């Protein structure tokens, strides 16, 4: 079990304690995702930044490369029969 | 003939003074005479309230995920939590407090959602959008009787 943490809000203008906790979680920019081991210290860290992130529970981690691949469209195309045909009702 | 009091009053309510009475570049507006003019809407708008509710719901979901995660981790590892811990408590004061004592968005009154305690305001309440960094902080608990 892991915490999947996605940064939703920027840390600009926030208190040093919040910024340091975000840094400790490995977060730098919005929509960045990191996976954290579950422990009391991670849980308390996340509690400090609960307004800025989205926390999910997942079974396994993913590498940055895998996350990037998941976001990609499949290359090439497939032909849909009568796909462009207009149907008037 | 307009007096200074008239001009000040007109400025306060946002009226425009005819240019003939204002001496060109030396016309006295609130910005010219005081520097900054920070404008706040008197109330939160409906979409602002909607987005605020969405953010509060996300915080609730986050607290649940953080607490559940640690609880499952403790069960998995067979770690016995603190003295006060039961089946649904992690034994960490801050985490259990956030999970069980922090008001949830769904259980809060509109007044508490959209305003917060302020010692200098009328009726000790201030609209949430007057608070610094109000979109990045939580304002769920107020002093008792306020």
Image: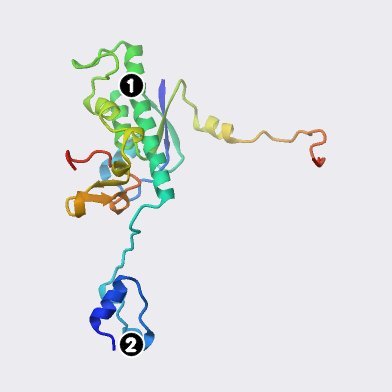
Residue denoted by label 2: B21
In the displayed structure image, the side of residue A69 where residue B139 appears, left or right: left
Circle 1 chain:
B
Q: Nearer the viewer, residue B49 or B61?
A: B49
Q: Secondary structure at mark 2?
A: helix
Kindly tell me whether residue B23 is visible in this rendering.
no
| Residue A8 in which image quadrant | top left
Q: Secondary structure at mark 1?
A: helix
Which residue occupies 24% across, 38% down?
A: B141
**In the rendered image, the vertical position of residue A42 relative to residue A59, given as above or below:** below
| Residue B52 in which image quadrant | top left
Circle 2 chain:
B
Q: Which residue is at the far top?
A: B78
Q: Nearer the viewer, residue B54 or A23?
A: B54
Q: Nearer the viewer, residue B51 or B12?
A: B12
Which residue occupies 35% across, 59% down?
A: B41
Residue denoted by label 1: B70
Spatial separation of the CA atoms under disc 2 and disc 1 = 70 Å
**In the rendered image, the vertical position of residue A62 relative to residue B29, given as above or below:** above
Q: Percent position (x, y) of residue B21?
A: 33, 87
Which residue occupies 40% across, 52% down?
A: B45
Disc 2 residue crowd, few under 14, some 14–19, many 20+, Cα 10 Å: few
**In the rendered image, the vertical position of residue B38 relative to residue B74, given as above or below:** below
């Amino acid at each position: 079990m892991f915490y999947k943490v996605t940064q939703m809000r920027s840390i600009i203008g926030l208190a040093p304690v919040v910024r340091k906790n975000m840094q400790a979680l490995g977060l730098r920019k919005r929509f960045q995702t990191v996976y954290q081991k579950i422990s009391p210290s991670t849980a308390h860290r996340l509690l400090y930044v609960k307004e800025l992130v989205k926390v999910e529970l997942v079974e396994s981690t993913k590498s940055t490369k895998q996350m990037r691949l998941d976001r990609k469209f499949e290359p090439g195309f497939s032909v849909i029969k009568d796909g462009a045909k207009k149907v008037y009702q | 003939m307009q007096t200074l009091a008239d001009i000040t009053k007109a400025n306060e309510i946002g009226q425009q003074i005819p240019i003939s009475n204002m001496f060109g570049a030396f016309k006295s507006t609130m910005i010219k005479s005081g520097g900054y003019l920070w404008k706040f809407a008197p109330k939160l708008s409906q979409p602002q309230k909607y987005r605020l509710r969405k953010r509060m719901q996300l915080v609730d979901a986050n607290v649940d995920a953080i607490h559940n995660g640690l609880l499952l981790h403790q069960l998995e590892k067979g770690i016995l939590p603190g003295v006060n811990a039961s089946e649904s408590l992690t034994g960490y004061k801050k985490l259990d407090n956030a999970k069980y004592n922090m008001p949830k968005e769904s259980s809060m009154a509109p007044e508490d959602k959209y305003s917060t305690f302020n010692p200098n305001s009328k009726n000790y309440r201030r609209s949430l959008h007057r608070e610094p960094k109000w979109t990045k902080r939580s304002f769920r608990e107020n002093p008792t009787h306020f």
